[in-house]
Amino acid sequence: MSIIRTIILQDIAGQPFEHMAVSDSPDAARRPGILLFPNVLGAKEADFIRAEKVAALGYVVFVVDLFGQGKRATRADADPARYMNALKDDRALLRDRLNAAHALLKGLDGVDPARTAAIGFCFGGLCVLDLARSGADIAGGVSFHGVYQAPPFPNAEITAKLLICHGWDDPIAPPDATVALAQELTQAGCDWQIHAYGGTGHAFTDESVNMPDKGLAYSADADRRSFRAMADFLAELFG
């Protein structure tokens, strides 16, 4: 089995964006398409590797560039959150970019436009939730150690099923924020589930993170369990 990576360029309001489509099949058979929203740093090799693991389950995975071509951050930067914060401060702009990426995914060769979903990590988890909140016709979404605050405007009807994979000791999404998300989704009539992992903080899928004093650390157990939960969830959506 060979993995195929394809750079996909997109123009949004005159700004170039550079996405990556990942598939394990060169044939023309249409498969479900999965948006993958990266964390605070933007699209990077770790996301492409994660996309390959998901693609091996039988999907076309689309790693989304939300910041713009060439706009990437590292943890060594003076302000590694600058691109993310610009979108968190303008949730309408974020919503529009999320939906533009979804529209592009649905038009890709090999993607069944009637069968799409989204997964996301940290800031990407917020993106999954905001895409669902926008009323996008994704079948479902999975947030890994995400950010939960709702945007400052009314949601559209949420039709997507949602799986929230959550570290219970996450300082970015403490218990009150998690309960507030559950209440929001319940009031919206959403089909939702939360998998909470005890003794687990933020960034539990990111092997490069080891800051337990700040509540951010990789957890092999939570990473394995959440990936399995995601795989089962996607299989239920599209099986």
Image: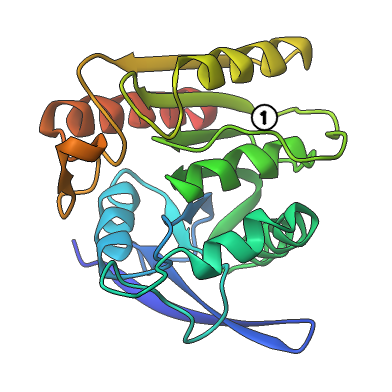
Residue at the image position 36 percent from the left and 46 percent from the top: 58
Way the structure is coloured: rainbow
Q: How many marks?
A: 1
Residue highlighted by disc 1: 160
Give residue 205's position: percent from left, percent from top.
25, 41
For residue 123, say whether it is visible. Answer: yes
Give residue 54's position: percent from left, percent from top.
32, 47
Q: Nearer the viewer, residue 94 or 169?
A: 169
The N terminus, quarter of image: bottom left
Residue at the image position 42 percent from the left and 70 percent from the top: 79
- Up the image or down, 204 lies above or below 109; here it is above
Residue at the image position 77 percent from the left and 11 percent from the top: 187
Q: Secondary structure at mark 1?
A: loop
- Up the image or down, 79 lies above or below 198; here it is below
Give residue 134's position: percent from left, percent from top.
78, 42
The part of the image, by quadrant, that contains residue 202 is: top left
Residue at the image position 74 percent from the left and 58 percent from the top: 90
Q: Mark 1: few, some, or many residues within 10 Å (few <14, many ≥20)?
A: many
- Please give left or right for residue 208 compared with residue 119 in the image: left
Q: Amino acid at mark 1?
A: Ala
For residue 65, say whether it is visible. Answer: no
- Up the image or down, 196 lies above or below 11; here it is above
Q: Nearer the viewer, residue 73 or 191?
A: 73
Q: Nearer the viewer, residue 128 or 81?
A: 81
The part of the image, by quadrant, that contains residue 66 is: bottom right
Give residue 16's position: percent from left, percent from top.
63, 87
The part of the image, by quadrant, that contains residue 60 is: bottom left
